[in-house]
Structures are given as structure tokens and as C-alpha cells.
Image (cartoon, helix red, strand yellow):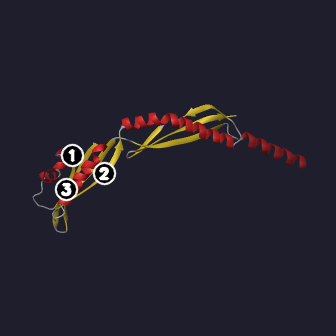
Amino acid sequence: MRLFSTIVFFLAGVCVVSAQPAKVTANVSVTQTAAAGTASFLIQFLDANLSSTIDTPLGVLKDTGLAASHLSEISVALNQGFVVTTYDFTLNLPAEQYAATRDRLIAIQRSMQTTTSQALGWSTSFSASEEEMSKALEQALPALLVSARAKAALLATAIGKTLGEVESVSAPMVNSTGLSLVIGLTASYFVQ
């Protein structure tokens, strides 16, 4: 029985040794802020005048560069006994024009404080251009490869191995959240 136990333990030890990986994989990423891109304004103009037409919001918002071609939706609803017309506009501008456009919208909104029949609201989102994302990838790639190798070396050392050659590198990915770009890749290395 003792001989059987020794063989089982020996086989278990062989299995553990052979279960150690022949490669290590490192996932790395870096975050950058795009220098340019697009600012998308979603502008909503509410008008409770019965004679409201598209000319009303266009006249009020003329300093923003808004035109009838930016109109995305018109809706009319009865709200607390009033007919309210809502005009939704989408205005896409270079990101560097964001602050000036925002300031003009704030000034228009403040000038409307005394009116009880009109209101203005907006939201803004940002997106990086394909050119910006390509540029960020080009800049980040060399450092990502160095970082992946360093991380893989740490992993190899942790399992008592020596880092070998590159087995594979994934296609780098650029994920955009507004003007924040996350560039990442995965690299696998053989270990000895």
C-alpha cells in the first residue's frame, strides 16, 4: 500500500509540474486625451406660443450658428393646458469651438430668464476623430510593447521561468469615451 501511495504522489507531482504554463500573457493599456475631436450639442428649445414656427428658435439661436438643417425633431404636446412645441437640434462642431458655443448658449439662456413662454436646454458629448485615434495608437504602441514585455517578465519570474520570445501580439484596440482614448493590447510570450 505504501508503494502505491508513493507512486500516486509521484504522479501528482509530475502533473503539477507539467501543468505549469509554457507561455505567459500580458494585457496592457494606456489612457490618453485626444487633442481634437467633435463636440455634439443636443439643443432643445421649448416654445409655448401658439404661433410658434421654426423661425422662432432659429432667430433666438442665430448666434450659435444653428440652421434649419440642424433640426432633428419637432414635437407638439399639451402640457398643463398649454400647447408646447419642442424643437430638437443637433449641432456638431470641432471640439475647440465647444467653449465659445457653450458660452453663447448660456448667454441666450440667461437672456430668456424673464420669459414665461420659452425655455432652452442642451447637453454635450464629445468624440475623437479617426485621425486622432490613429495618432494616439501610433504614439502609444512602442511603450505598450515595452510594458507588455516587462509585465510578462514579472509573470514568468513569478512562476520560476525565464521569459522567451514573443508568441503573439493581438491587434491593438482603441476605445473612445468622449475625448478619452484607451489604447490596449495583449502579448503572449514563451517561457523556459
From the top left corner, tell me how far across and down residue 163 is, in percent: 66, 35
Distance, label 2 to label 1, CA atoms, is: 15 Å
2 and 3 marks in contact (CB < 8 Å): no
Q: SS at mark 2?
A: strand
On the image, numbered disc 2 is attached to which residue?
124
For residue 149, which quarter of the picture? top right
How would you rate the neighbour count of disc 3 (Cα within 10 Å): few for under 14, some for 14-19, many for 20 or more? some
Kind of residue at disc 1: His
Number of the front mark, 2 or 3? 3
Which residue sits furthest right?
A: 2
Q: Residue 108 — which label?
A: 3
How would you rate the neighbour count of disc 2 (Cα within 10 Å): few for under 14, some for 14-19, many for 20 or more? some
Label whose residue precedes the other's in the sequence (2 or 1): 1
Which residue sits furthest top?
A: 165
Label whose residue precedes the other's in the sequence (3 or 1): 1
From the top left corner, tell me how far across and down residue 78 is, in percent: 18, 64
On the image, numbered disc 1 is attached to which residue?
70
Q: Residue at x 73, y 39 (%)?
A: 18
Number of the front mark, 3 or 1? 3
Q: Residue at x 44, y 40 (%)?
A: 174
How would you rate the neighbour count of disc 1 (Cα within 10 Å): few for under 14, some for 14-19, many for 20 or more? some
- In-front residue for pair 158/102: 102
Residue 58's place in the image compared with 36, above or below, is below
